[in-house]
């Protein structure tokens, strides 16, 4: 004799409220295989789909990517890539400009999701500035430049990038 196994999950209407999507979207995504319920799929008329918490995370990611202007086709590719990473996505940050999607796994590893793991690089500017401040402070104070403006030359100066003092906000050029 078979025993019924009690499984828990989130039903469609609750999923829609939690994720912030319409039931029509949820149904479409399930029917097209974009996001299928892992606890219990629909088994005919009147049956309820049940979604796990991990399914909710996936659905929320889909919604956020679509809200950011990423096409549904690219969202599908990104979700396929994320599924290859397994269920622990807590250390991954997705970055998108609407056309490309990057998965940041750490400060040193950024992957182009749509190019199936093509490595890319990024340079965080704050650590560069902090490192330079440390290196410069070990040297003598900066030398003062003599300013000399030839008579009759009152042209505009070229604006320069100003870096804020340690711990401050950047100042405007001027």
Image (cartoon, rainbow, N blue to C red):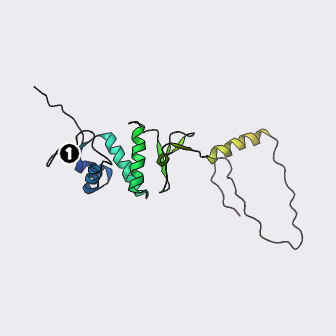
The residue lying furthest to the bottom in this view is: 152
Indicate the position of residue 17 as horizontal and vertical percent values.
Answer: 28, 52
Q: Quadrant of the N terminus?
A: top left
Viewer-side residue, 18 vs 104: 104
The residue lying furthest to the top in this view is: 1
The residue lying furthest to the right in this view is: 151
Indicate the position of residue 91 as horizontal and vertical percent values.
Answer: 46, 38
Q: Residues within 10 Å of mark 1 (few under 14, many from 20)?
A: some
> 95 left or right of 157?
left
Q: Quadrant of the C terminus?
A: bottom right
> 132 left or right of 19?
right
Indicate the position of residue 112 as horizontal and vertical percent values.
Answer: 51, 46
Looking at the image, is 143 positioned above or below residue 1? Answer: below
The residue lying furthest to the left in this view is: 1
Indicate the position of residue 127 as horizontal and vertical percent values.
Answer: 64, 43
Look at mark 1 in the image and give the residue it sits on: 42
Callout 1: helix, strand or loop? loop
> 92 left or right of 119?
left
> 25 left or right of 165?
left
Viewer-side residue, 57 vs 171: 57
Q: How many marks?
A: 1
Q: Quadrant of residue 22?
A: bottom left
Please give the name of the residue rendered at 43% of the width and 43% of the height, measured from the top-left corner.
Answer: 81
């Amino acid at each position: 004799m078979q025993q019924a196994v009690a499984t828990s999950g989130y039903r469609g209407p609750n999923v829609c409220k939690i994720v912030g999507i319409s039931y029509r979207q949820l149904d479409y995504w399930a029917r097209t295989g974009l996001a299928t319920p892992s606890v219990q799929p629909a088994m005919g008329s009147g049956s309820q789909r049940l979604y796990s918490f991990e399914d909710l995370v996936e659905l929320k990611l889909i919604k956020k990517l679509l809200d950011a202007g990423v096409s549904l086709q690219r969202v599908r590719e990104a979700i396929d890539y994320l599924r290859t990473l397994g269920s622990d996505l807590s250390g991954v940050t997705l970055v998108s400009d609407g056309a490309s999607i990057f998965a940041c796994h750490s400060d040193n590893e950024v992957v182009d999701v749509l190019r199936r793991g093509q490595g890319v690089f990024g340079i965080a500017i704050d650590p560069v500035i902090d490192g330079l401040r440390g290196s410069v402070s070990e040297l003598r104070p900066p030398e003062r430049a003599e300013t000399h403006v030839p008579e009759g030359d009152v042209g505009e100066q070229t604006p320069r990038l100003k870096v804020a003092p340690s711990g401050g906000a950047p100042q405007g050029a001027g």
